[in-house]
Image (tube, rainbow, N blue to C red):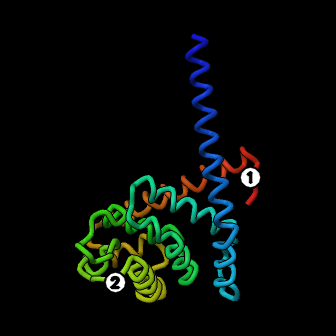
Amino acid sequence: MKYKLKQKIILLILITGLFLARANSLLAKDSAGESAKFRNHFKGKEENLTSKNLYLKKWAIRSVLERYKSPLIEEVDNFILACVTYNFDCYLLPSIAGLESSFGLFVYPNSYNPFGWGGGRIIFSSWAEAIDKVAFGLKNNYINQGASNIWSIGIIYSESPTWASRIDWFMSEFKNEENKIKLFLEKNSVKL
């Protein structure tokens, strides 16, 4: 009995150590250049996101995309850039990609269109272009026209009456991941 308990404790210590090492490496990488790049880009723009909140959102998006083995994993900065540039929820675009293409896993070949934009038949030259063009389209053709939440966007975006509730589920997944990260950082006294 004591042997199994010792094994569990050792395993828990190893997992915690690996998670802390990963967290510290992400923090070091981001503080060395990424956050400065974001601060300079967002300077003078109206947004209600702090650097800390952007970092948490970035980490949450990365974590969820890793879990799904998404080809969009290298586009996390572009998701953050789009949400700040076009002033909408940072989890909206990744959630649409989650619903429409399982985070880019199932798209028309070489279309780089994880959003189902144009019925999925519009072809982009890269994931980055798709993220920017769809963010621009959402802002100008939906949000600026009065579609202020996923429910009113869904009526226009999709024929499915369940689109908005499914997007809401994905957005909750990102928010839950962000809350787990916050809790982990607080428990381990890690400051951003």
Bin the neighbour count of mark 2 within 10 Å (Cα to Cα): few under 14, some 14-19, many 20 and up.
few
Front residue of 174/55: it is 55
Judge whether 59 appears above or below 136 on screen. above
Q: Residue at x 65, y 66 (%)?
A: 30
Query: Quick check: can you spot residue 9?
Result: yes
In the image, which disc is placed on residue 190?
1
Tag 2 residue: 125
Quadrant of the image containing the C terminus: bottom right
Judge whether 132 appears above or below 98 on screen. below
Quadrant of the image containing the N terminus: top right
SS class, disc 2: loop
User: CB under 8 Å between callouts 2 and 1?
Assistant: no
SS class, disc 1: loop
Q: Residue at x 43, y 59 (%)?
A: 170
Instruction: Say what amino acid the circle numbered 1 marks.
Output: Val
Count of labels in the image = 2
Mark 1 or mark 2, which is nearer the start of the sequence? Answer: 2
Residue 12 in picture, x, y percent from top left: 60, 32
The quadrant where residue 114 appears:
bottom left
Judge whether 141 appears above or below 56 on screen. below
Give the CA separation, mark 2 to mark 1: 39 Å
Q: Is residue 1 left or right of residue 166?
A: right
Residue 105 in picture, x, y percent from top left: 31, 63
Residue 92 in picture, x, y percent from top left: 47, 70
Instruction: Say what amino acid the circle numbered 2 marks.
Output: Ser
Q: Residue at x 61, y 20 (%)?
A: 6
Q: Residue at x 48, y 55 (%)?
A: 173
Q: Is residue 80 left or right of residue 43?
A: left
Q: Residue furthest top?
A: 1
